[in-house]
């Protein structure tokens, strides 16, 4: 039986006369890695913002675990289990790496208003276990703002993991990374998702990453879904080849 | 397990407190030395100077309470004078209208400050950054107008003067000791609050509110809590103004008065707990001594502030800890730096 954890139904978003997202439907199966791809300006980031509640849809619904999360504030959506990692590195620059992850643990356990205990120290020690899994243990006491770009991305994923998400939304997790860093993050996403049973929805420019790790790929073009299916199905989809991969393939052939 | 060396690594970190008592003692050493120095000064100085010291001590609390929002929450408020004024006016109006005894007013005032912070915070925190600063500034002007115009209730422009403190507090040493005790207890509580899970969340919000919100934290509610706690302790500082001056008048809620603790925090270093304390003492004594030489002492303060913001955004305390860090690193490096072979083993240089 299909088990849809996140569903998007007829989502529309207009910016003035421009329709950035045009009647998008999406069904994300529990425990899968679901990629959303498309050329620049296809509406991927807008779609993600609509899902996480940082933008309000013009029309349509977003359903998480059978409940509509439309119009809910972003911290409420995060509490329901949908956690996002932003496209641009977005860390708390003056906190230490361990404190950053501890912040997620404190949030997950509703200890944010605890003004009298030293629970943050226990959380910080616990954070080390998560940092171990994402390969940042050696930086536990470093100031987050001093990490390399790749490490900051890994830290963001660690912060998100700390609040035990059902669905992890990654907006271009490997943007601006070296091939080596990209491989590390891709491996990290796969291993954490499989180990913890987390559903991952990601948008990504790097097609090697997309076709390497995804179970399902949805293709957006000019705000509309033009194709969806397994990586193999999407690869051989004529329209996709024409407007998206087609260009890449031609470019690839011409290059050498 | 692999987490073990990791835990060690963390424990070796700056404030993880590997050996809890040694670490705690080392961190408490400087504040403790400062406290003892102030206490000894207060007990040995001439009465006129004791009063000045007492005022600086009370302003230190005002600055730290304001910095709870500024340095830890990332919220620039020019309205904390409102709560300072609530503290001062509660004591003086309680006396003038013969409705509250001194001790009743001293206890009630912080709670009134906190209670008023709830609605004001709910309004002001709807806005961000510059708009928040301007809105809090407007609130302090509103408080100023109320204090000035409600002549029958507040004494208007002249304010309230009189024998509103018990006679034993007219002895400078007693009033100094009471102030020092209240400020010390308040600072200890604020220290605890800022070194709690709430304090960590607040620092996270300061650095990146969107990120923290995406982690499931209700940022608005946490900022409101910070506003209320700050209001409480600003009101405590306000009651100490009455202990110092036996008066309240509209100027203490003017927006320029709200700017003073912000200056102090910036001068001293807003990213450290004790920075604003240092700032309060520097500001107050600069004020006291500069005024003997120049009418335009505020101009001097302004230039100093500009220099700090441009050159040393971490303030005096930040600079001091940076120097300490460099010194420690150099000390650690010296024996390890040059190759060990040509040096005599365990040279007597250290």
Image: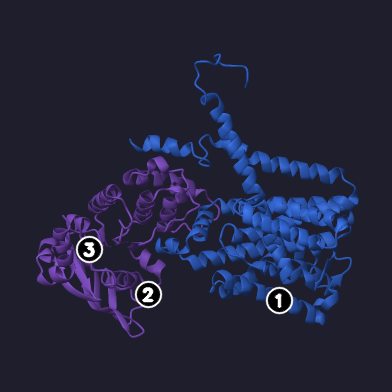
Chain colours: A purple, B blue
The label shown at residue A35 is 3
* Res A99 seen here: no
Indicate the position of residue A201 as horizontal and vertical percent values. Answer: 26, 63
Distance, label 1 to label 3, CA atoms, is 54 Å
* Res A140 seen here: yes
Q: In the displayed image of the protein, which residue is found farthest to the bottom?
A: A17
Kindly state the secondary structure of the residue where label 2 is placed: loop
When the figure is inspected, residue B189 is found, relative to residue A47, above or below; the finding is above
In this orientation, which residue lies closer to the viewer: B334 or A34? Answer: B334
In this orientation, which residue lies closer to the viewer: B105 or A32? Answer: A32
In this orientation, which residue lies closer to the viewer: B32 or A85? Answer: A85
Mark 3 surroundings within 10 Å by alpha-carbon count, few (fewer than 14), some (14 through 19), many (20 or more):
many
Q: Who's the residue at 33% across and 79% down the image? A: A57
Q: Quadrant of residue B321?
A: top right
When the figure is inspected, residue B71 is found, relative to residue A65, above or below; the finding is above
Indicate the position of residue A18 as horizontal and vertical percent values. Answer: 32, 82
**Chain label for disc 1:** B
Do marks 1 and 3 share a subunit?
no
């Amino acid at each position: 039986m299909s088990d849809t954890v996140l569903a998007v139904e007829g989502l529309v978003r207009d910016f003035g006369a421009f329709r950035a997202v045009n009647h998008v439907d999406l069904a994300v199966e529990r425990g899968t890695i679901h990629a959303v791809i498309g050329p620049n300006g296809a509406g991927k980031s807008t779609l993600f913002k609509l899902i996480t509640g940082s933008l309000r849809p013009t029309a349509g619904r977003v359903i998480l675990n059978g409940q509509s999360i439309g119009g809910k504030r972003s911290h409420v959506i995060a509490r329901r289990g949908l956690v996002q990692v932003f496209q641009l590195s977005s860390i708390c620059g003056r906190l230490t790496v361990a404190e950053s992850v501890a912040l997620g643990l404190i949030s997950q356990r509703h200890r944010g208003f605890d003004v009298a205990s030293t629970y943050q120290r226990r959380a910080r020690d616990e954070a080390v276990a998560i940092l171990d899994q994402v390969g940042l243990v050696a930086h536990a006491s470093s100031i987050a703002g001093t990490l390399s770009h790749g490490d900051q991305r890994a830290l963001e994923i660690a912060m998100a993991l700390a609040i035990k998400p059902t669905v992890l939304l990654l907006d271009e997790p490997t943007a601006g990374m070296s091939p080596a860093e990209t491989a590390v993050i891709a491996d990290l996403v796969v291993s954490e998702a499989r180990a913890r049973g987390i559903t991952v929805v990601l948008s990504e420019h790097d097609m090697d990453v997309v076709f390497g790790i995804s179970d399902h790929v949805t293709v957006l073009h000019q705000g509309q879904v033009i194709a969806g299916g397994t990586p193999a199905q999407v690869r051989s989809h004529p329209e996709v080849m024409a407007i998206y991969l087609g260009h890449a393939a031609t470019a690839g052939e011409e290059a050498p | 397990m692999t987490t073990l060396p990791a835990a060690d690594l963390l424990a070796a970190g700056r404030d993880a407190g590997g050996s809890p008592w040694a670490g705690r003692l080392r961190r408490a050493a400087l504040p403790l030395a400062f406290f003892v120095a102030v206490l000894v000064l207060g007990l040995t100085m001439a009465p006129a100077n004791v009063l000045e010291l007492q005022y600086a001590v009370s302003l230190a609390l005002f600055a730290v309470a304001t910095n709870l929002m500024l340095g830890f929450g990332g919220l620039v408020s020019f309205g904390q004078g409102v709560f300072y004024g609530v503290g001062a006016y509660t004591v003086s109006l309680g006396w003038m209208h013969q409705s509250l005894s001194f001790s009743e007013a001293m206890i009630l005032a912080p709670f009134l400050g906190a209670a008023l912070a709830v609605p004001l915070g709910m309004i002001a925190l709807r806005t961000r950054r510059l708009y928040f600063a301007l809105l809090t500034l407007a609130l302090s002007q509103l408080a100023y107008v109320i204090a000035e115009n409600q002549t029958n209730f507040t004494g208007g422009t002249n304010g309230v003067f009189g024998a509103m403190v018990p006679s034993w507090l007219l002895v400078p040493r007693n009033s100094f000791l009471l102030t020092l005790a209240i400020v010390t207890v308040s600072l200890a509580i604020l220290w605890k609050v800022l070194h709690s899970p709430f304090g960590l969340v607040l620092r996270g919000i300061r650095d990146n509110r969107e990120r923290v919100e995406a982690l499931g934290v209700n940022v608005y509610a946490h900022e409101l809590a910070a506003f209320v706690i700050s209001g409480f302790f600003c009101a405590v500082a306000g009651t100490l103004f009455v202990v110092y001056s036996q008066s309240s008048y509209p100027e203490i809620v003017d927006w320029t008065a709200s700017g003073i603790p912000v200056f102090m925090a910036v001068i001293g270093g807003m990213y450290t707990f004790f920075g604003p304390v240092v700032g309060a003492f520097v500001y107050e004594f600069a004020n006291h001594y500069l005024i003997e030489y120049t009418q335009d002492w505020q101009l001097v303060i302004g230039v100093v502030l500009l220099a700090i913001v441009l050159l040393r955004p971490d303030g005096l305390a930040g600079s001091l800890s940076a120097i300490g860090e460099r010194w420690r690193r150099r000390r650690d490096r010296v024996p390890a730096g040059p190759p060990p072979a040509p040096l005599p083993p365990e040279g007597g240089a250290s």
